[in-house]
Amino acid sequence: MSRLGLKPRYSFGSLHSLMLKTPKLPTLNFQALKALAADATTAVSKTASAQSSSSTSAPCSCAASDSTGWISSPASLSDSDFQEVGTLLQDPFVEPTFAEFHPDGTRYDSPDAPIAPRYFPYNRCTVSTCKKCGRAYLRYTEAGGYFVDRRIRALSVEKLVDAKVED
Ligand SMILES: [Zn+2]
């Protein structure tokens, strides 16, 4: 009778793959992004009303610079001020389009430019919320030949447009 079958069997393979796993941001579809934007708006208005009742109306440091349209991330803000909650990059193996969506003649950095998640630059953004006030932001890194620039834009539910990309 063989006793080999009673030997404990460790699967080093599965343990190894577990250790290699890095925390991965969830990919957000349009509905998830919209829900997140709406949640953040609610969180901020709650914070704002709590602040006005205690007669402190100083805005959160994340809102000190107007990021209604795209801006370079202010030096006063660091990654540690934000909690990344998801990404709009749908497929890490496919480079998303550089086409922009401006049906009403807006420009890249127009404050009223639509937020169309399938179009540039939204299609390579991560979505983050401010750890202090809960405001939601879109962020990505603009990389040129000689520079790297962190860009940030406030996520506004009113500006979200679920526009399809045409081939
Ligand atoms: Zn904030």
Image (tube, helix red, strand yellow):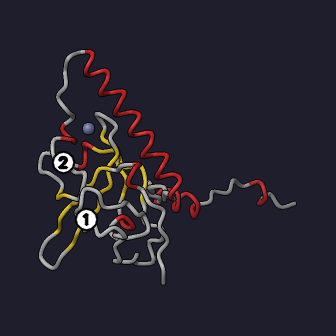
Question: Ligand 1 closer than 8 Å to the CB at disc 1?
Answer: no
Residue 153 lies in quadrant:
bottom left
Q: Amino acid at mark 1?
A: Thr
Residue 6 location (% of width, % of height): 77, 54
Residue under circle 2? 66
User: Of all residues shown, which one is farthest toward the bottom?
Assistant: 167
The residue lying at 30 percent from left, 34 percent from top is 133
Name the element at disc 1.
Answer: strand
The residue lying at 38 percent from left, 54 percent from top is 159
Q: Residues within 10 Å of mark 1 (few under 14, many from 20)?
A: some
Ligand 1 is found in which quarter of the picture? top left
Residue 112 location (% of width, % of height): 29, 57
Q: Earlier in the sequence, mark 1 or mark 2?
A: 2
Left or right, residue 120 beside residue 166 = left
Q: Would you say the residues marked 1 and 2 are in contact, meaning their CB atoms lie under 8 Å apart?
A: no
Vertical arrangement, residue 57 with respect to residue 97, above or below: above
Q: Amino acid at mark 2?
A: Asp
Residue under circle 1? 141
User: Of all residues shown, which one is farthest toward the right?
Assistant: 1
User: Of all residues shown, which one is farthest toward the front?
Assistant: 104
Name the element at disc 2.
Answer: loop
Residue 108 location (% of width, % of height): 25, 67
The residue lying at 48 percent from left, 62 percent from top is 162
Q: CA distance from mark 1 to mark 2?
A: 18 Å
Between 56 and 11, the one lying in front of the other is 56
Instruction: Kindly report which numbered mark, 1 or 2, lies closer to the viewer in this rendering.
Output: 2
Between 163 and 121, the one lying in front of the other is 163
Vertical arrangement, residue 50 with respect to residue 23, above or below: above
Residue 49 lies in quadrant:
top left
The numbered dot on residue 37 is none
